[in-house]
Image (cartoon, rainbow, N blue to C red):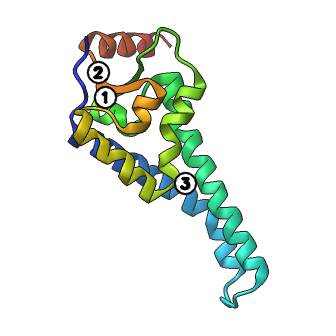
């Protein structure tokens, strides 16, 4: 059995991931802000802002879901040497989508994260998705290093 990831490592991993996502999503939004340099608020500006919010939400869920499903880790989790594991034998993409839904809402993420203090190691959506965040075993690190050196 692997040890649950400490809360501080999870927080630092999340901050790294949010910085990465912030740079990516901000760079996508620059053309929008440059084209509306007069800052006149129009109906089309509201429509575009809504589109941008949806785009950021989709990119955020995709980033976390794809990396955690395929690699078990986001870039932030790699730095903090933690990973996401399925608690059931066969992991599914839907598990990883479900565990990442709160990331699109600050309030939902905050409430979801409070559950860690009750459960000791899982967010509420981790529990719903049957996933857990654990410390990376040293053997896994060695296997990943060896496989990357072979490529």
Callout 3 secondary element: helix
In the rendering, which numbered label is found on residue 136? 2
Whether 15 is drawn above or below 123: the answer is below
Label 2: few (<14), some or many (≥20) within 10 Å? many
Side of 94 relative to 84 (left or right)? right
Q: Residue furthest right?
A: 44
In the rendering, which numbered label is found on residue 82? 1
Specify which label sits upstream in the sequence, 2 or 1: 1
Side of 52 relative to 112 (left or right)? right
- The residue singled out by tag 3 in the image is 24
Residue nearest the observer in this picture, 52 or 132: 132
Residue 82 at what x, y percent from top left?
Answer: 31, 28
The residue shown at (40%, 30%) is 127
Q: CA distance from mark 2 to mark 1?
A: 5 Å
The residue shown at (21%, 43%) is 8
Q: CA distance from mark 2 to mark 3?
A: 27 Å
Q: Residue 43: which quarter of the image? A: bottom right
Query: Can residue 132 be seen?
Result: yes
Residue nearest the observer in this picture, 55 or 141: 55
Residue 144 at what x, y percent from top left?
Answer: 39, 15
Whether 72 is drawn above or below 45: the answer is above
Label 1: few (<14), some or many (≥20) within 10 Å? many
Whether pointer 2 and pointer 3 mark residues with C-beta atoms closer than 8 Å, the reply is no
Whether 23 is drawn above or below 40: the answer is above
Q: CA distance from mark 1 to mark 3?
A: 23 Å
Side of 69 relative to 83 (left or right)? right
The residue shown at (69%, 88%) is 41
Whether pointer 2 and pointer 1 mark residues with C-beta atoms closer than 8 Å, the reply is yes
């Amino acid at each position: 059995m692997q040890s649950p990831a400490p809360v501080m490592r999870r927080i630092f991993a999340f901050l790294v991931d949010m910085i990465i996502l912030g740079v990516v999503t901000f760079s996508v939004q620059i053309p929008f802000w440059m084209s509306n340099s007069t800052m006149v608020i129009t109906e089309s500006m509201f429509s575009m802002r809504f589109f941008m919010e949806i785009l950021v939400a989709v990119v955020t869920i995709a980033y976390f879901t794809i990396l955690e499903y395929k690699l078990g880790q986001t870039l932030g989790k790699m730095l903090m040497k933690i990973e996401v594991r399925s608690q059931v034998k066969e992991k599914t993409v839907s598990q990883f989508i479900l565990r990442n839904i709160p990331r699109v809402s600050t309030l939902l993420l905050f409430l979801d994260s409070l559950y860690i203090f009750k459960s000791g190691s899982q967010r509420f959506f981790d529990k719903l998705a049957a996933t857990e965040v654990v410390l990376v075993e040293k053997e896994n690190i060695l296997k990943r290093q060896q496989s990357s050196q072979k490529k």
